[in-house]
Amino acid sequence: MKIEMTDRRQPWRLVSAALGGVLLIAGASCIRITITTPGPQVVRPHILDGDGGGVFAAVQAAPITSNPATICGNPVPGPYVRFSNPYLTQTPDAGFTGFRGTVFDLNTALPISNTDYYLQYFVNVANNGCCTNVPGSGTEIGCKVTAGLPYRFTAFFKTGHVPPSDHQIQLQGAWTH
């Protein structure tokens, strides 16, 4: 049995379709899209101190929360920065035997004191260790390296010196002779 439309239901169907179209247009015009970046993407010039150091691209990342650990024989509360943007590892060319660098907080545009963290270098499980503070400097660190091997650097912050998790921390430096 077929039910025929009456004159009363036809206008309501048209009104419903029109109202649906108006709501769709209104909803689409109210959509707001926001794109945010993780923080400042600043690359500072390399710190060479006139020693003719080799090219080391500045690398950065945000702090990552972790469990307490022991790094190079020193206890740390856990938070660290694994420098991975834009490169996870970098390899010194032939003739370079060291690395010398400084860690910066890009949100404050200030260097971080070399007494606030331990900078660990990592090639593999048999070749890793920590850089040491450069004598006479409150910000520079350094370590011996072997040319041709890929190095990854991670800063482990000491208790009371962990940067905020939304800050971008950057390692600048140079391979040295």
Image (spheres, grey):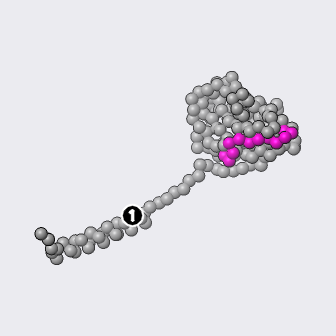
In the image, residue 34 sits, relative to residue 44, either above or below, namely below
Residue that sits furthest to the top in the current view: 73
Q: Nearer the viewer, residue 84 or 25?
A: 84
Name which residue type carries label 1.
Answer: Gly
Q: Quadrant of residue 53?
A: top right
Q: Main secondary structure of the magenta part?
A: loop
Residue shown at the point (70%, 25%) measured from the top left: 72
Residue position for label 1: 27
Q: Quadrant of residue 118?
A: top right
Report if residue 68 is visible in the image.
yes
Q: Quadrant of the N terminus?
A: bottom left
Residue shown at the point (15%, 74%) measured from the top left: 4
- Percent position (x, y) of residue 19? 30, 69
Q: Is residue 92 magenta?
A: yes
- Percent position (x, y) of residue 42? 69, 50
Q: Quadrant of the C terminus?
A: top right
Q: Which residues are magenta?
A: 85-96
Residue that sits furthest to the front in the current view: 1
